[in-house]
Image: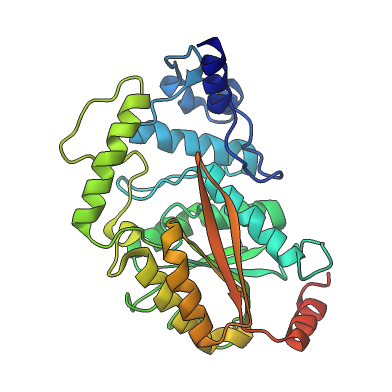
Amino acid sequence: MALKSKNTKSKRTKKLELHPRNPHRARYDFALLADSCPELSRFILLNQYGNESVDFANPEAVKTLNRALLSHFYGVAFWDIPAGYLCPPIPGRADYIHYLADLLATSNQGVIPRGKGVKVLDVGVGANCVYPIIGHQEYGWQFVGSDVNTVAVATCEAIVASNPCLKGAISARLQAQPARLFDGIWKDKDRFDLTLCNPPFHTSESAMVGESQRKWRGVKSQSVDATPQSNPTLNFGGTAAELWCEGGEAGFITRMIKESVQYGERCFWFTSLVARQHNLDAIYRVLKEVGAVQVKTINMAQGQKISRFVAWSFLADDQVDYWKDHYWQT
């Protein structure tokens, strides 16, 4: 019994396989975070194991924790999102960015391309703007974030305008055609080294609600002061467009792959998170059908579970050489 208790404690104090450069590998230092974000102090409490934590079933506590993390680790003085919009876990978002940096390095003799010469498109940036914040602050990359939601776009713009460290590095564009992903966003002169995406997970609103109720039971069991709800809103929130779409994750990524073909010579790597491993076979089939030259699947951690992203490219070897010689030399 003692050995089991020790192993359980170890699992609680170390996040699974986060990227070596991810600054969130260790347990949160809540005293340090509260120094960067004083309002976090009112949410800090002792959990059932006697460790400082916050109630992860409380959306306001989760948002304030994110604000503290972005302030302490990424120098973001102002960050806020409207109620009900997706408030993502920062460690998993950082992992995606760091693995994307490694992906670029594999084509650059192991050296990560940095600075404003690297352009990234975040498909479905959301109101939180987290991927662009981390990518710019860690690697100096330039970002365009697209979204179908006018409030999300306006919120991103407000976050950027309120933080001098982000000005001129991140822009947001409204996708006026909800059925399209790149069309209408990708301008004639745009070229992107990377696209990234955290696609809607669910196939319908009813499927989303069922999954939310299941997750709520898990959050409730780990939280200090959570109460049951018949129609729970998860601690991380999310609007309909952020959480579900026709065909779910597989349908969304399939549409993205098919639309990426016409932009194939103006992007080094297209990528998307794939939460459900069983969707990979269908994704690989579509990538083969459209003639992707390179396809890679990169496994990583997302919080306490294993996730992955798929990357594909249409560039031939001579195009790869031209790209890195002309765009990545600083």
Residue 292 visible (yes or no)? yes
Residue 9 on image: x %, y %:
54, 20
| Residue located at (76% from left, 66% from top) | 106
Nearer to us in this view, 166 or 119: 119
Nearer to us in this view, 264 or 63: 264
Relative to 41, 36 lies left or right: right
Residue 218 on image: x %, y %:
33, 33
| Residue located at (83% from left, 72% from top) | 329
The relative height of residue 116 versus residue 17 in the rendered view (above or below) is below
| Residue located at (61% from left, 36% from top) | 72
Residue 187 visible (yes or no)? no
Colouring used for the render: rainbow
| Residue located at (52% from left, 89% from top) | 262
Nearer to us in this view, 284 or 181: 284
Residue pushed farthest left? 230
Relative to 148, 15 lies left or right: right
Nearer to us in this view, 329 or 150: 329
The relative height of residue 309 versus residue 314 in the rendered view (above or below) is above
The relative height of residue 301 versus residue 186 in the rendered view (above or below) is above
Residue 193 on image: x %, y %:
65, 73
Residue 300 on image: x %, y %:
59, 51
Number of residue marks: 0
Quadrant of the snapshot with the C terminus: bottom right
The relative height of residue 30 versus residue 124 in the rendered view (above or below) is above
